[in-house]
Amino acid sequence: VVQPLAIDDPATPEPADHWLHPCECLPDAWDGAPASPDVKEVIPPGSGNRFIPPPLELVSGQFVCNMQFLLEVKFETQDEAMEHKVCESRCRDNPQCGFFWHGTQHEATTCRLYSDCTALVREFGISGVLVALPRQTMCQIAN
């Protein structure tokens, strides 16, 4: 006789009441498969696995978002440095900004802000990093 596989949610008192799909939010008390051990490390303590994730690097090199979503282009000047953190801050300060690109454009340090990014576009003469800036509360999935 083969016993059925019973899966339990350790966050609830009821036995055998849960199965965790790899794309579901990871409960606080979950330990083990299908979540890899490093997954819990990204969940801020005390958040209940509901948090706004840090910026996420999408791609580096000659790739940017579609021009139709371009909000702003800012070049470094003698008076204003355009470092990565400055570009990120400009994006955070603009409620429409969901993505930013920081890098060099024809040897000039540049920051571009985008409202959306539905496709990657290769642009010659540039080199940088495209970053997503999450603004909504999310959860870490099991992976």
Image: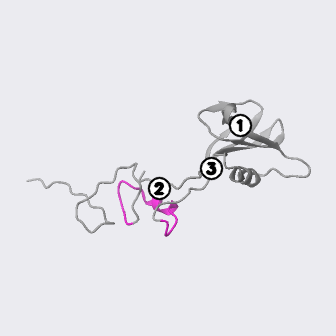
In the rendered structure, which segment of residues is drawn in magenta? 29-47
Give the Cα separation between the discs numbered 1 and 3.
15 Å
Q: Amino acid at mark 1?
A: Leu
- CB of mark 3 within 8 Å of CB of mark 2? no
Using residue 18 as the reference point, say whether residue 65 is left or right of it. Answer: right
From what the image shows, is residue 17 above or below residue 129? below
Q: Nearer the viewer, residue 100 or 39?
A: 100
Tag shown at residue 83:
none
- CB of mark 1 within 8 Å of CB of mark 2? no
Residue 8's spot in the image, x, y percent? 26, 61
Residue under numbered circle 2 = 140
Q: Secondary structure at mark 1?
A: strand
Please tell me whether the stretch drawn in magenta is mainly helix, strand or loop.
loop
Label 3 CA crowd tier, 10 Å (few <14, some 14–19, many 20+): some
Q: Amino acid at mark 3?
A: Leu
Q: Secondary structure at mark 3?
A: loop
Residue 25's spot in the image, x, y percent? 41, 55
Residue under numbered circle 1 = 70
Q: Secondary structure at mark 2?
A: loop
Residue at the location (47% across, 59% down)? 38
Label 2 CA crowd tier, 10 Å (few <14, some 14–19, many 20+): many
Residue under numbered circle 3 = 133
